[in-house]
Image (cartoon, rainbow, N blue to C red):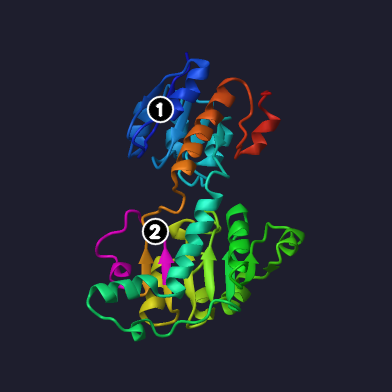
Amino acid sequence: MFKVVVTDYEYKSLATEQEVLKEIGIELTTAQCRTEEDVIEACKDADGLINQYAPITRKVIEKLEKCKVIARYGVGVNTIDVDAATEKGIIVSNVTDYCIDEVSDHAFALLMSAARKVVHLDKAVKEGIWDFNVGVPIYRLRGRVLGLVGFGQIPQALASKAQAFGLEVLAFDPFVNEEVAKQLNVQLVSLDELCKQADYISVHAPLNEKTTGMITTAQFKLMKQEAFIINTARGPVIDEKALIKALQEGTIAGAALDVVEVEPISKDNPLMKMDNVILNPHVGWYSEEAQEELKRKTAQNVVNVLSGYYPKYFVNHSLREQLKLK
């Protein structure tokens, strides 16, 4: 009998995961780990982990006695030290395609809300102010430029939605083939050029050592004064102190953020008091359908590995050379 531990979760039920894992006779062990020590205590003898936010650091991984797979709920794997897992021969898996529509829809909803000043005007009306001048200036969407930082599946979906509203789309992604961009009628440019040209900048880069703080003071100084920045990726991709300063000084027009550097956001964060900032609680991924798909595919990754197969969603591909799975 394999032992599989859910290190932490915020779902009402794990029935979906239990249903999938029962295919090979596994019953879940659940925990709500917050620290490295919590994870080590709950998981040191586990054959597999399912992880949401708990830290799966090198210290944790070194204490795992027989773990074969760490499956993460989500696309990003920034909670897991992938290098340490690879060194120990542990497969890391994620789910890359469960919320493409949801996040691209949410990013565009935030863009539209920022561009049309929807939240700001709503607040004014509820305070008894019936005056369109509260939202001045608002610019026509058609003909303006959307810049995408990252050009994977989600921003590619966003590009087609934005183009339907008449937006021109630019993208920065050093890992994307130019032919892919051409087929989608998107121009690949440098990050600096994107910052100069875009009226709306939507961040979709994964969080890693190279992308942490990649949007900082230098980039804000290149942006148009009427530009809005939207982030549905990971908070630390944007240098939050630099963003706050840019907003306070009027370097850019506003921001629409589904993610921030530290979640949940603190009450004394200056972003909380800015009328030109829209804040959401990291909800872009969510729909009932996406949540069900995520839970099922995450559990299936574990089942695949413990049954002797490679998972469909395989992060540390270099292990194929040393593992003899099907």
Residue placed farthest to the front in the image? 130
**Does residue 93 lie above or below 129 as drawn?**
above
Give the magenta range. Answer: 255-274
Q: Secondary structure at mark 1?
A: helix
The residue that disc 1 covers is: 15
First in sequence: mark 1 or mark 2?
Answer: 1
Left or right: 319 with respect to 216? right
Where is residue 256? Give x, y as percent: 42, 67
Residue placed farthest to the left in the image? 128
Residue placed farthest to the right in the image? 179
Which residue: 53% across, 28% down?
Answer: 302
Between disc 1 and disc 2, the foreground one is: 1
Q: Is residue 54 visible?
A: yes
Where is residue 116? Give x, y as percent: 44, 75
Q: Which image quarter is the C terminus in?
A: top right
Foreground: 228 or 305? 228
Which residue: 54% across, 79% down?
Answer: 222
Within-10-Å neighbours for mark 2: few <14, some 14–19, many 20+ = some
Q: Secondary structure at mark 2?
A: loop
Where is residue 251? Give x, y as percent: 44, 81
